[in-house]
């Protein structure tokens, strides 16, 4: 029986070693080396402002003795909106200035959170919140004060007036 034990041990070892030695490669090719230089700092490319659509939107104006001010479009022709229709990024134009407006559903003073990017003017740069009342959209500052009032003239365009009486358009 000693021979059978030795034979069994030799055969078992041979089988085990045979399973370990394989001529086929089961590994993926190595990845190329990554750069070893540190990340350098620099200026990012400027973001191109969103250009308003080419089509002309005729806005009603009201003339006073001293100045001409923008008026809201007719509320009866304004579109019905849901809050979710307003979410995301928009282009905004007022008083010759074009910049970006972002609206979220995060609650904020006077409504929901809004922010602008690239706005330099005193009115547009203060927008911090928005609110939807029926068909009317109100843009507000951080204190909850009104900055502008708009109505949806198209599904992707709102027109209105700022509190200073300037026309304002928000569009995608």
Image (tube, grey):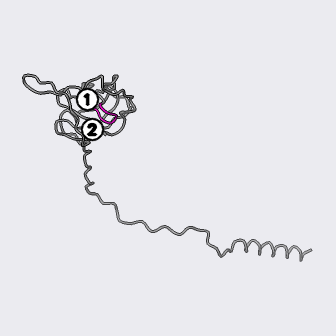
**Whether residue 24 is situated above or below residue 125 in the rendered picture:** below
Question: Horizontal and vertical percent for residue 97?
Answer: 19, 40
How many numbered circles does the render carry? 2
**Whether residue 155 is situated above or below residue 42 in the rendered picture:** above
Task: Name which residue lies at 28% across and 32% down.
Answer: 158
Name the disc covering residue 141, or none: 1
- The residue labelled by disc 2 is 116
Camera sees residue 164: no
Question: Horizontal and vertical percent for residue 53?
Answer: 26, 42
User: Start and end of the magenta stretch?
Assistant: 153-158
Quarter that holds the N terminus? bottom right
Give the crowd class for mark 2: few <14, some 14-19, many >=20 residues within 10 Å: many
**Residue 15 belongs to the span the image colors magenta:** no
Question: Horizontal and vertical percent for residue 98?
Answer: 22, 41
**Whether residue 7 is situated above or below residue 42 in the rendered picture:** below
Residue sticking out furthest to the right: 1
Is 6 left, or right, of 89 in this rendering?
A: right
Is 106 left, or right, of 24 in this rendering?
A: left
The one nearer the camera, 42 or 122, is 122
**Residue 155 belongs to the span the image colors magenta:** yes
The one nearer the camera, 73 or 23, is 73
Quote the CA–CA distance across marks 1 and 2: 11 Å
Question: Horizontal and vertical percent for residue 13?
Answer: 77, 73
Residue sticking out furthest to the left: 66
Residue 91 image-quadrant placement: top left
Residue 74 image-quadrant placement: top left
Residue 56 image-quadrant placement: top left
Q: Are marks 1 and 2 in contact (CB under 8 Å)?
A: no
């Amino acid at each position: 029986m000693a021979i059978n034990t030795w034979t069994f041990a030799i055969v078992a070892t041979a089988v085990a070693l045979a399973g370990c030695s394989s001529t086929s490669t089961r590994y993926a090719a190595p990845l190329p080396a990554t750069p070893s230089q540190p990340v350098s700092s620099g200026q990012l490319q400027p973001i191109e402002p969103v250009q308003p659509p080419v089509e002309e939107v005729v806005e009603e104006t009201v003339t006073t003795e001293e100045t001409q001010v923008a008026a809201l479009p007719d509320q009866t022709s304004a579109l019905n909106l849901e809050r979710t229709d307003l979410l995301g990024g928009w282009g905004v134009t007022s008083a010759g200035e074009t910049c970006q407006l972002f609206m979220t559903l995060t609650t904020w003073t006077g409504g929901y959170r809004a922010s602008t990017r690239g706005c330099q003017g005193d009115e547009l740069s203060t927008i911090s919140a928005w609110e939807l009342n029926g068909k009317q959209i109100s843009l507000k500052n951080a204190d909850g004060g009104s900055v502008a009032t708009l109505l949806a003239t198209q599904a992707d365009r709102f027109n209105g007036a700022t509190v200073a009486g300037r026309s304002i358009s928000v569009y995608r």
